[in-house]
Image (spheres, coloured by chain):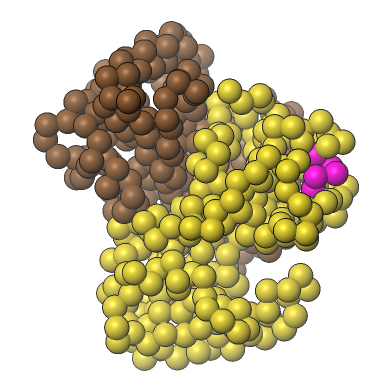
Chain colours: A brown, B yellow
């Protein structure tokens, strides 16, 4: 009688953007896990914190949030074994994930390590992409438009080709790649309509026209929306 | 003192996938609007119905859900004027939207007509894409993968080119386009890993391997997930 591994999306930052289901699952689950930096607080946990009762077993999965990802793979190995011990003992585990668990999240890495060994259930969440578009009231995609979601960490030619092959682009994981992304969008004639949104829906949310963001102040948790349509 | 127009995402189908914020906004707003077919019930309203108290003014925006969209544009004109009358009179209006308001939704069409005239606020929601990936526990995108979201209503060459220019594809609005989509994915060698999910998270949810779906039974509210990675 093993436990169930829940991937629980806690949404993009505003604690009110948890779903009713996320709140219920995290409240009825005895073991909570979440990604966290090597030192300091977990953003996923802080978003969910208004809904977390005392007495939970909590497991911080500490990861180097650096561009080369450092020793993340072995850290996922260790975390997955740690969670597996609880699941084998019959305890349900909820892995809290920023945004949606299966959209550029930590959960996929743990899932790949435990798939087939335990029951798994995913509670989808509001993505930072949805929150970014809400912050600027600009459609991510509408009608028959196609959308490309592109990590800013990819090389310049790849990013440009992916933007070219879509009607709208959402570029994620901006951080130190802002200059590169802005250069590409400027060459493609898309910089004027593009919007920069960081920490969408959180208290620290900032919204700018792309042209107005200083290169050294872009956040990793920032998104650039670049539609080819002209918005009202 | 005009009212505020709220675009409220009610999520993909499970009433428990509304956010806490969506529930609060729709409960404190006197006028609720929602898209609906020409005859019959609104799916967005039915998802939100456990949270709707008696005494609301309700406005069904009736639209022909046909491939050519019929007289949708004039119906949006009329609906927007109807909502504007409430907003001008100082009443807040919540437009309930399936999934997320700015991801292939009705809201963008109303927004384009009222932008600049009234305060607008968007409550992002869980998309059917997130719910579809949750239903099959398959990442939509992970790590440095790029994602293409592609309406199945586009022509064959366009769909193939957009799939080619991405690491993962999510093809939306399947319906009568299933045969076309399956043909493209088969030629690209991606049909084996592809999954078909309809009415994700709703009681009527169905999940199939793409090869196993009968061509005449595909739903419009269905998504095909086709990653280029091999999943565990």
Can residue A226 be seen here? The reply is no
Residue B141 in sight here: yes
**Closest to the observer, B118 or A30:** A30
**Could you tell me what secondary structure mostly forms the magenta stretch?**
helix
Give the quarter of the figure containing the C terminus of chain B: top right
Q: Residue at x 45, y 71 (%)?
A: B46
> To which quarter of the image does residue B110 belong?
bottom right
Q: Residue at x 32, y 19 (%)?
A: A88
Q: Where, quadrant-wise, is the N terminus of chain B in this rendering?
A: bottom left
Q: Is residue A112 above or below residue B155?
A: above
**B184 or A142, which is in the foreground?**
B184
Residue B183 is inside the magenta segment: yes
Q: Give the residues drawn in magenta, as a range.
A: B181-185
Q: Position of residue B52 (x, y in %)?
A: 33, 75
Q: Image height check: is B158 above or below B13? A: above
Q: Residue at x 60, y 84 (%)?
A: B39
Residue B127: percent from the left, percent from the top?
Answer: 51, 53
How many labels, in total?
Answer: 0
Q: Residue furthest left?
A: A54
Rendered location of residue B41, percent (x, y)? 52, 78
- Whole-percent x and y of residue B77? 61, 85
Q: Is residue A121 magenta?
A: no
Q: Residue at x 41, y 21 (%)?
A: A65
Q: Is residue B160 above or below residue A173?
A: below
Q: Is residue A148 left or right of residue A203?
A: right
């Amino acid at each position: 009688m093993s436990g169930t591994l829940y991937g629980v999306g806690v949404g993009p930052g505003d604690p009110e953007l948890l779903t009713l289901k996320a709140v219920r699952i995290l409240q009825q689950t005895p073991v909570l896990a979440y990604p966290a930096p090597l030192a300091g607080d977990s953003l996923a946990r802080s978003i969910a914190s208004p809904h977390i009762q005392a007495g939970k077993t909590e497991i911080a999965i500490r990861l180097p949030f650096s561009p080369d990802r450092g020793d993340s793979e072995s850290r996922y190995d260790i975390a997955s074994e740690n969670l597996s011990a609880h699941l084998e003992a019959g305890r349900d585990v909820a892995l809290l994930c920023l945004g949606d668990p299966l959209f550029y999240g930590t959960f996929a890495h743990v899932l790949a390590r435990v798939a087939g060994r335990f029951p798994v259930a995913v509670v989808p969440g509001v993505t930072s992409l949805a929150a970014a578009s809400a912050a600027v009231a600009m459609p991510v995609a509408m009608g028959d438009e196609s959308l490309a979601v592109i990590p800013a960490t990819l090389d310049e030619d790849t990013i440009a080709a992916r933007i070219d092959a879509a009607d709208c682009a959402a570029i994620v994981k901006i951080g130190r790649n802002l200059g590169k992304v802005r250069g590409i969008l400027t060459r493609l004639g898309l910089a004027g309509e593009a919007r920069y949104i960081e920490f969408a829906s959180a208290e620290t949310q900032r919204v700018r026209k792309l042209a107005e963001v200083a290169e050294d102040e872009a956040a990793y948790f920032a998104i650039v929306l670049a539609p080819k349509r002209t918005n009202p």
